[in-house]
Image (cartoon, rainbow, N blue to C red):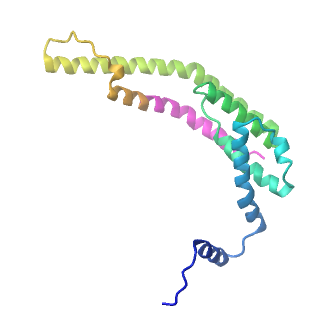
Amino acid sequence: MGEEIKSALEIAMEKVEKLGGVTEEERRKWKYVPEGEKLAARYLKQDLNLVVELGKYGEDARKCVIEGAGDILTRNIGLPRNDLARKNNRRAMDGLKVLKSDKVSVENVYSRMRRIFDHYLEQGEQQKKQAYQSLKTEFEAKVQQAMQQQLGTFAGVKIDVENQPQFQEEWRQLQAQLESQYDKLLDEYKRELSAIA
């Protein structure tokens, strides 16, 4: 009955000791990667100079801060669905360019990303409009057929299918399917960005 109740921290520290000592590099990462993540979040929301902020850290810590910030900035690049998303992309991409030392490789990935964005804005919108119209026509035909079967020849009633929950759900699924093609390519480019020094 004389067993001692240990805190979660004590248990965690015992497990770490059993694994072997923690390296200085691991300790640095634990401390500075989250600081880099916070820095990136502040950068995206405020008018912040990344070069000045990074200058506040020593060389070893700066590497970890850059790692954390780079991860957050990369995750914040997405399809340009609206003006806010386009602005956010530009801000994140500008920030990554500051963090990365291989500017040429970064710009190469960016040019491919921009092609995806342009295609999404031009052909993607057109594809969505065509798909929407096709789905609407198909849905209207199904509703008309169902009404004819239930009511007989009384098919003169016009139903606004766009406000039907089932239509809206099918449209959301179709839209997600169309955008997933762009998302897959963009994710591939984001992985490439993450790998650039």
Percent x, y of residue 73: 69, 41
Hey, which quadrant is residue 53 in on the image?
Answer: top right
Asked if residue 195 can be seen in this view, the reply is: no
Hey, which quadrant is residue 100 in on the image?
Answer: top right
As drawn, the residue found furthest toward the bottom would be 2
Of 125 and 13, nearer the camera is: 13
Instruction: Judge whether 8 appears above or below 168 on screen.
Output: below
- Circle count: 0
As drawn, the residue found furthest toward the left would be 152
Percent x, y of residue 77: 65, 36
Percent x, y of residue 9: 62, 72
- Residue lying at 70% horizontally and 49% vertically, measured from the top left: 37
Q: Is residue 8 magenta?
A: no
Q: Which secondary structure type mostly characterizes the magenta part of the structure?
A: helix
Left or right: 70 in relation to 172: right
Instruction: Judge whether 13 appears above or below 86 on screen.
Output: below
Asked if residue 151 can be seen in this view, the reply is: yes
Left or right: 130 in relation to 111: left
Percent x, y of residue 110: 72, 32
Left or right: 37 in relation to 7: right
Q: Is residue 188 magenta?
A: yes
- Residue lying at 42% horizontally and 32% vertically, measured from the top left: 173
Q: Which residues are the magenta region?
A: 174-197
Of 136 and 91, nearer the camera is: 91
